[in-house]
Amino acid sequence: MKIQGPGGPKGLPPTAPVGNADRADASSPVDKTRETQPAAPVTTPAPPDAVASVAAELRAGTITPEKAVERLVDMTLGSVGAKLPEAARAELRGRLEALLAEDPYLQAKARRIGITPASEE
C-alpha cells in the first residue's frame, strides 16, 4: 500500500456575479449607525442590596456578627418562608440554625466574621 501526500480542497467553487457592486448605496443602514445620541443621565441610584446592607453595617461595627447572622436568617424567612404557616416557619428557622451550628462550610464563614462556633467554645 502506498501512502499518498496530503490532500485537501482544490479551491473555491466559482461564484455568481453580484450585480452592480461598483458603488455603495448612500442610504444604507450602516450610515444610520454613525448618528449618536448622548446617554440619558442617571437620576436615581439602584436600591441597595439587603445582604450588602447587612455586610456594610457589620463592617462599620454598628451590629455584631451574631446580629448580622440573625438578620440574614430573618431575611431568608421573610422571602423564602413568607407564605408558610407559622409552624413551618418555626421549623425552617430551627433547621437553618442547626445548619449554622453543624455545617463545616457555614462554620468557616461564621469564623471569618468573628463568630466562634458552639462546637469550639
Image (cartoon, rainbow, N blue to C red):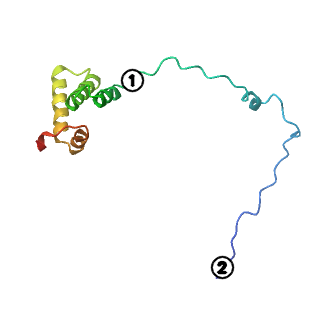
- Quadrant of residue 20 within the rendered picture: top right
Depth check, front residue: 119 or 23: 119
Measure how far apart labels 2 and 1 are at the Cα level. Answer: 70 Å
Residue furthest out toward the top:
43
Depth check, front residue: 51 or 62: 62
Quarter of the image with the C terminus is top left
Q: In this figure, which residue is indicated by the disc labeled 2?
A: 3
- Quadrant of residue 89 within the rendered picture: top left
Residue ID at (83%, 47%): 16
- Quadrant of residue 82 within the rendered picture: top left
Q: In this figure, which residue is indicated by the disc labeled 1?
A: 48
Number of numbered discs visible in the structure rendering: 2
Quarter of the image with the N terminus is bottom right
Task: Identify the mark nearer the N-term, 2 or 1.
Answer: 2
Callout 1, which amino acid?
Pro
Position of residue 75 measured from the top left corner of the image (x, y, whole percent): 27, 25
